[in-house]
Amino acid sequence: MHNPGTATPERFPAQDRFADGAQYIAGRYAKGTSGRTHAVVDPATGEEVYTYDLAGTEDVDAAVAAAREAFPGWAGATPGERSDAMHRFAAVLAERAEDFARAESLQCGKPLKLTREFDVPGTIDNIAFFAGAARHLQGQSAGEYSGDHTSYVRREPIGVVGSIAPWNYPLQMAAWKVLPAIAAGNTIVLKPAELTPLTSLLFAEAATDAGIPDGVVNIVTGTGKEAGEHLVGHPDVAMTSFTGSTAVGKRVAEIATATVKRLHLELGGKAPFVVFDDADLEAAANGAVAGALINTGQDCTAATRAYVQRPLYEAFVERTAALMESVRLGDPFAPGTDLGPLISHVQRDRVAGFVERARSYARVVTGGAAPQGELGDGAYYRPTLVADAAQDSEIVQSEIFGPVLVVLPFDGDDEGIRLANDTPYGLAASAWSRDVYRANRATREIKAGCVWVNDHIPIISEMPHGGYKASGFGKDMSAYSFEEYTQIKHVMFDNTAVARKDWHRTVFGDR
């Protein structure tokens, strides 16, 4: 089934590319075979923009078979050949940047300025980085570590990777899954969220158009329960990489371990934002608003818990509330829009539920409501600041995934760091101070995979992204990601040419 929906060509210039379906297997689009359909909905209007046939288990099998067939040739290509193909991939994506930006804004509700200035350029940069990194798969230097043997280390691709990506950054998450895998010589089957498949499909198509062989990058668009679980449990899938909630990550791990797969999990977050009393108040307030509201707060590294030392607490609350009230909600395609809708009305209502329950134990300083009028049909929610909640309250401890920041005071530095660490999560954090020793202590003692100092959110291709504790394990981006997508092999050569080695006496004979 294919229903182009109501989106205009201006909002959805790439819509004709999906006429053949929302599966991309062995270099071509196809329709799903589950017998069920799903609609991509513009969350800014509530209108269906594309209806497609969901993938079933047969589609997953076909995609895995295509990836398995393509693996020997792609793994056997030289690093230079893979690098050249990926450089062409970056060039194709750059040529189609506007199509990608508009498709991402349409399916996610992101302001066009975010997709144009962050999602798409960041993805192009990721491709360029991994195009270079493909030529630098290095192991330990060769040497005679035993005295009688020469040892060296090989890094080899694992095989077919089965990855599952979330709906909050569909394009970037596709890139984070696909790029290190294929740069290392693996092939991949990616299942994007069924809410937001469009840019993942365009991404795979661009790979094919860049000359990356058919079957190296495959997309299956189906539900997690059917397509996702079948992909994770597939016997021909050698590795699973998952980004999403901690609860679903536990289920993925349970299925993957049944077949002893390599596993990479990037899970939930509840990032602390620790403001010491010597911080630049204006910088901290601006950083908190930007860090809390980027992508309408639907970011696992978003600033969600601001701990502010008591001398600055009231001033921080006042200034942050004023800045939040200046943020402009609107049509994602309008030039003046700062903040778009949440991904769906279901997610909007979930976020609202957290805030409504918090009214019984905390103070909603600003926001806390969905706008009416011309935005009433969309999944919008006003930027919300909550103060004076208890540390053990739901709004402090649980991942909300919306435009909500909760602010709590602390007294001494020990308390601030203790409170920052007091959740199950450990993905990202930030510390705000003019004192280098104070800031350095925070970077050492806060248990998170990334700690920013006097900023919050920026990521770069050269540095790793991944968490501690219930936020998962493994790294995206950077050269460290090759540790996830390669197998380490020790090769050892005898240098003596002696038939009867001295150590053989432990099995037979005497010295």
Image: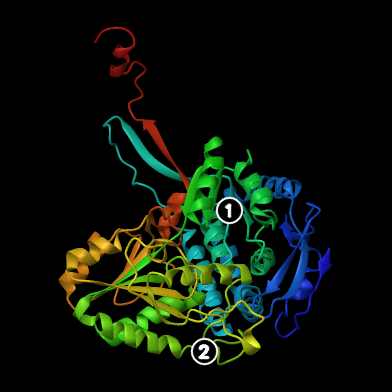
Name which quarter of the figure residue 27 lies in: bottom right
Residue 163's disc is 1
Label 2 environment density (alpha carbons within 10 Å; few <14, some 14–19, many ≥20): some
Q: Residue at x 51, y 44 (%)?
A: 253
Q: CA distance from mark 1 to mark 2?
A: 36 Å
The picture places residue 149, in percent across and down from the top left corner, at 33, 32
Q: Secondary structure at mark 2?
A: loop
The picture places residue 7, in percent across and down from the top left corner, at 75, 80
Name which quarter of the figure residue 143 lies in: top left
Q: In terms of depth relative to the viewer, which is nearer, 287 or 13? A: 287
Q: In terms of depth relative to the viewer, which is nearer, 320 or 462? A: 320
Which amino acid lies under the numbered mark 1 shown in the image of this protein? Answer: Ser
Evaluate whether residue 84 shows in this view. Answer: no
Name which quarter of the figure residue 385 lies in: bottom left
Q: Residue at x 25, y 84 (%)?
A: 280
Could you tell me if the residues under marks 1 and 2 are in contact, i.e. CB atoms within 8 Å?
A: no
Which amino acid lies under the numbered mark 2 shown in the image of this protein? Answer: Arg
Tag 2 or tag 1, which sits nearer the N-term? 1
Q: Quadrant of the C terminus?
A: top left
The picture places residue 324, in percent across and down from the top left corner, at 43, 85
Please indicate whether residue 26 sits to the left or right of residue 311 in the image: right
In the image, residue 449 above or below residue 286: above
The picture places residue 308, in percent across and down from the top left corner, at 26, 75
Evaluate whether residue 28 shows in this view. Answer: yes
Label 1 environment density (alpha carbons within 10 Å; few <14, some 14–19, many ≥20): many
Please indicate whether residue 393 sits to the left or right of residue 134 in the image: left
Residue 328's disc is 2
